[in-house]
Amino acid sequence: MLYDVLVTTPLFYSSGDPHIGHAYTLIIGDLIKKYYALIGKKAYLLCGVDEHGEKISKRADELHMSPDEFVSKTSAKFRKLWERLDISPDAFVRTTDSEHQQLVLSVFESLMDAGKIYLSNWKGYNCVSCETNYSEQYYSHSQVCEMGHKLQSRTESAYFLKLQDATTWLTKHYNSAEIIIPEYYLKNLTQNFLNKLEDLSITRKNLQWGIKLKDEAFTIYVWFEALICYFSNSAIRKMWEVNSKTKIIQVLGKEIVRFHSIYLPVILKSQNLKLPEKLLVHGWLLNHDRKISKSEMKTNPIMPLTEILNTLHLESIKWFFSFLNWTDDHPFDIKLVKQLFNKYVVNLLGNLINRLKGILAKNENSTSFINGEIKHVEIKEEWQKGTILLNNLETWVTELKITSIIHEIVNLLEKANKMVEKIEPWKLSVESGDYKELNVYLYRQLALSAYLLSPIFGNAKWQILKQSLSIKNSIDSVINLDYWNSIQNFSNISLPPITNLFEKYS
């Protein structure tokens, strides 16, 4: 099958249990896939786990398990997370897969044959927790990694990937289009890395848990081999071919920008594969102003993910994450999740649906019939705003401005609520022009909003909303402007009785 879009999430490091930060990234990737589907594009979602390295080996030892047994159990927990989040990735990749390991060695050998890899001595500083190396230049101004972990001095022989000759073409590539979102990460990338690019150490000495070279004293560095996992599956690799029409979007946290914007492109170019069209960099979820992460759980504990998922409705978590500006950092606050869900989903969307049904009670629970155009000036203007939203939808989706869609929907619904207060339909007869135009307009805005929010609510809730609003099953493309602009499509629609569609938090 040909896909229009490939969406990838980070390959989560399997050194511990999933947390809410993992859920955040997964939900972003899933929303991008589903909104692309909403505009008629076939999207493919790739998720997975990164399972090698010193930290995992140490953690397995602590638990008196083999590394393979440990990562298998951790991988199963991540798969379970997908299910709990009602997310169905099209591919779940693991760096322990044999196909991946074979390709990693093949890529290494091809780079070696091309003179892009050489053996030398590495001296610098390493963060075991992040599996990341830092130069002496970096250490001179910061003795901790970007995540705040202490760095350890390390000297060893290693194989290096030549990077210095990549500065020119990488700079040209990123200046040719808006690839990194938000753009300020490009400025940081240029100032701190591209302008002083150093060759990358891509092996570790005497590390037992990982992909070993023929010279078994060396093991491939996890941040080199994990990047290859995005295309090590033969079926997925076709989407990375230079002549592929598939648009590639990578969702990633801000701490791994340089890996995806420098090292992965260099690897891809060496294999004659294309580079991603978009890198969406999201901010961190914070607890007490510090990033939520596995390595911070002892000093900065947060409620376990299973407990969070048992405490909150899934749709409220997804609403919270879709409402946020993805490019900023945000505190994860259960109280705020509940407040936003109550305010916008229960009190605005849910209550407005029931308010419409109350208005229709004196019209046999059906929207009115309008023969002609809407005459009420303000209703006509608000109807047109729904059309403008639809006209902008594809642009917002392709620019990954999903939160803009959500906020525009909220604006439509708030204006609809105010329109009810202004027109006061309970004072009007069913034959009044304002009564007829108001209820048809309300119904159209609600049906449109429900459809545009369906990626957030998931299929089960969408089916309930469709039934509650008597939305036709024949609607298969939201970009059918003729359908959504036709007044007759929203006239004479019989609605079922009032129900509580969303459970309100106390």
Image: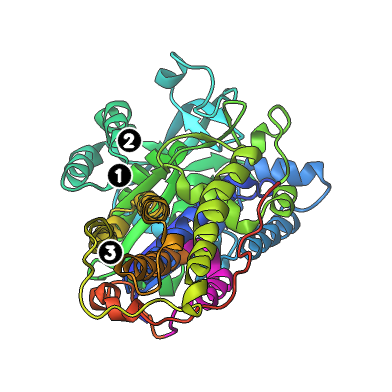
Answer with mark 3 or mark 2, whichever residue precedes in sequence: 2
Q: Position of residue 131 (x, y in %)?
A: 55, 38
Image quadrant assignment for residue 440:
bottom left
Element class at badge 2: helix
Q: Nearer the viewer, residue 276 or 132?
A: 276
Q: Nearer the viewer, residue 183 or 94?
A: 183
Answer with mark 2 or mark 1, whichever residue precedes in sequence: 1
For the residues marked 2 and 1, what is the alpha-carbon distance in whole angstroms?
7 Å
Q: Nearer the viewer, residue 88 or 35?
A: 35
| Residue 221 seen in this snapshot | no
Residue drawn at x 68%, y 49% is: 505
Q: Is the residue under label 1 in contact with that under label 2 (CB below 8 Å)?
A: yes
For the residues marked 1 and 3, what is the alpha-carbon distance in whole angstroms?
26 Å
Residue drawn at x 31%, y 47% is: 116
Q: Is the residue under label 2 in contact with that under label 3 (CB below 8 Å)?
A: no
The answer to whether residue 303 is magenta is no
The answer to whether residue 472 is magenta is yes
Which numbered marker is on residue 180?
A: 1
Residue drawn at x 54%, y 21% is: 144
Q: Where is mark 2, residue-wise?
A: 185
Image quadrant assignment for residue 170:
top left
Q: Position of residue 363 (x, y in %)?
A: 46, 77
For the residues marked 3 and 2, what is the alpha-carbon distance in whole angstroms?
30 Å
Q: Where is mark 3, residue-wise?
A: 390
- Extreme-bottom residue of the structure: 474
Q: Is the residue under label 3 in contact with that under label 1 (CB below 8 Å)?
A: no
Q: Which residues are magenta?
A: 455-473
- Extreme-right residue of the structure: 64
